[in-house]
Image (spheres, grey):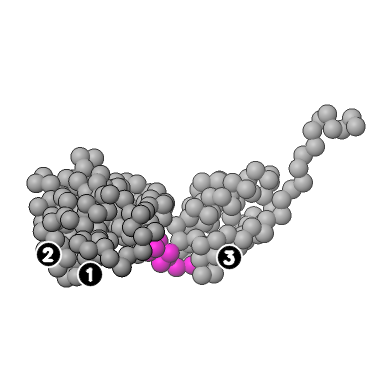
């Protein structure tokens, strides 16, 4: 079964209101040992995210910029300096917030985190209300499955029930999440689809394709040449 965000997220979320002060946010970041938290409105809808980097901008950029190389100050965007003057969550937050839904796939959340280089994402329902948060560490828990669990899913769920093929046609071995599959698929297409599907099984780190593929069929036209 493919894991969804709701399977991995944390339901108890440290969040702040838009009028939270800089000092309050700095204290809570340290108190709860988080790197960022969602900013919510009075109805608990997510309107932005404040990170430790946003707070650091105040100390790094506010006031005198002496000592900062001109090359760096030249590329800093106006909004970076504006944030350094912020006093509340509304001033400092990044908005609109990038969020995920409980039903989103783990792969989707991972792509967002990797692309945007963020450590956590607020989880919201269809109305935009905060229901949880998911972190990089949460997503990596999909690799906690044992080799035995992975092997059982590949053999019983994938090969037998999805592909309707006798599992005895294949030999599947799993070691530290790496799957090695041997066998003689009836067609090359079947073999390739099977390997692709195995890669999608939760907890699989890699797949070593050792299948003995049948030779490609020659077309009728080719028989006359």
Q: In which quarter of the image is residue 135?
A: bottom left
The answer to whether 13 appears left or right of 108 in the picture is left
Q: Position of residue 203 (x, y in %)?
A: 45, 61
Taken as a whole, is the magenta stretch helix, strand or loop?
helix
Closest to the observer: 8 or 19? 19
Q: Where is residue 19 in the image (x, y as percent from the top left)?
A: 9, 52
Instruction: Say which residue label 3 marks.
Output: 173
Disc 3 is placed on an element classified as strand
Closest to the observer: 11 or 100? 100
Give the distance between the C-alpha atoms of the residues marked 1 and 3, in whole angstroms: 40 Å
The answer to whether 195 appears left or right of 75 in the picture is right
Of labels 2 and 3, earlier in sequence is 2
Of labels 1 and 3, earlier in sequence is 1
Instruction: Say which residue label 2 marks.
Output: 23
* In the rendered image, the vertical position of residue 220 relative to residue 187, given as above or below: above
User: What is the magenta range?
Assistant: 139-147
Position of the C terminus, as image quadrant, is top right
Neighbours of disc 3 within 10 Å: few (<14), some (14-19), many (20+): some
């Amino acid at each position: 079964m493919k894991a969804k965000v709701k399977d991995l997220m944390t339901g108890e979320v440290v969040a702040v209101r838009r009028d939270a002060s800089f000092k309050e946010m700095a204290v809570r970041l340290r108190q709860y040992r988080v790197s960022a938290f969602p900013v919510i409105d009075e109805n608990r809808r997510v309107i932005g995210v404040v990170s430790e980097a946003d707070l650091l901008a105040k100390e790094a950029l506010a006031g005198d910029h002496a000592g900062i190389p001109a090359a760096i100050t030249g590329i800093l965007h106006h909004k970076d300096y504006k944030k350094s003057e912020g006093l509340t969550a509304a001033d400092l937050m990044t908005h609109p917030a990038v969020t995920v839904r409980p039903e989103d796939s783990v792969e989707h959340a991972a792509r967002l985190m990797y692309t945007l280089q963020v450590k956590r994402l607020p989880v919201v329902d269809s109305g935009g209300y905060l229901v949880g948060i998911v972190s990089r560490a949460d997503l990596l828990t999909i690799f906690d499955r044992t080799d035995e669990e992975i092997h059982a899913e590949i053999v019983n769920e994938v090969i037998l029930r999805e592909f309707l093929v006798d599992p005895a046609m294949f030999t599947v071995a799993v070691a530290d999440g790496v799957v090695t599959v041997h066998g003689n698929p009836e067609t090359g297409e079947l073999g390739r689809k099977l390997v692709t599907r195995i890669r999608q099984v939760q907890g699989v780190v890699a797949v070593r394709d050792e299948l003995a593929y049948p030779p490609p069929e020659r077309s009728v036209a080719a028989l006359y040449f």
